[in-house]
Image (cartoon, rainbow, N blue to C red):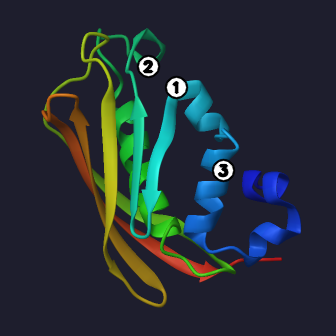
Amino acid sequence: MSMIHELLGDDGVNLTGVQQLRALMAAGRQPGIGESLQFTLVAVDTGFAAFEGVPGQHAYNPIGMVHGGYAATLLDSACGCAVHASLAAGQSYSTLEIKVAYHHALTDQTGKVRAEGRVVSMGRRVAYAEARLLDAGGKLFASASSTLLIRDRRP
């Protein structure tokens, strides 16, 4: 069962993507990945989504910095939710591919980072989105482009 269905019940199917995400935010709910990596959806609008988190020891790799998967996960979430926020009621999506570029290493000294995703184009079956991961001072740590498949939600 999806978190959207768990929180909104059958009524969630009749909401647009942006309405679903706003309902999740209003309820203070987030999926397990946000809990385990300690990041949160903080803003959503049609074609836009932003997540914030503080990279720390919980996301470190053996070589002494935040694992690249932390940045990739925030960027994938931002791209995906930007598309989700553009969906009509009864639609869903899945990521077909994502390309991540790393510009600077994240550490537990980086502080809060923000991943902002935006829809670049939205077709009937495929969407394209981009995201950037920035610190509070606007320094770019990673960026991504993503292709996503749009489909009808299964009952």
* 103 sits left or right of 100 in the view: left
Of callouts 2 and 3, the N-terminal one: 3
> Where is 43 relative to 95, above or below?
above
Q: Which mark is residue 59?
A: 2
Q: Which mark is residue 38?
A: 1
Q: Nearer the viewer, mark 2 or mark 3?
A: 3
Spatial CA distance of label 2 from label 1 is 9 Å
Q: Amino acid at mark 3?
A: Leu
The answer to whether the residues at label 3 and label 1 have Cβ atoms under 8 Å apart is no
The residue beneath circle 3 is: 24
The image quarter containing residue 12 is bottom right
Spatial CA distance of label 3 from label 1 is 16 Å
Residue 1 visible to an observer of this rendering: no
Crowd rating for badge 2 (residues with CA inside 10 Å; few <14, some 14–19, many 20+): many
Mark 1 secondary-structure assignment: loop
Identify the residue shown where x is 34% and y is 56%: 117
> Where is 21 relative to 135, above or below?
below
Identify the residue shown where x is 59% and y is 57%: 21
Mark 2 secondary-structure assignment: helix
Crowd rating for badge 3 (residues with CA inside 10 Å; few <14, some 14–19, many 20+): some
The answer to whether the residues at label 2 and label 1 have Cβ atoms under 8 Å apart is yes
Residue 122 visible to an observer of this rendering: yes
* 43 sits left or right of 13 in the view: left
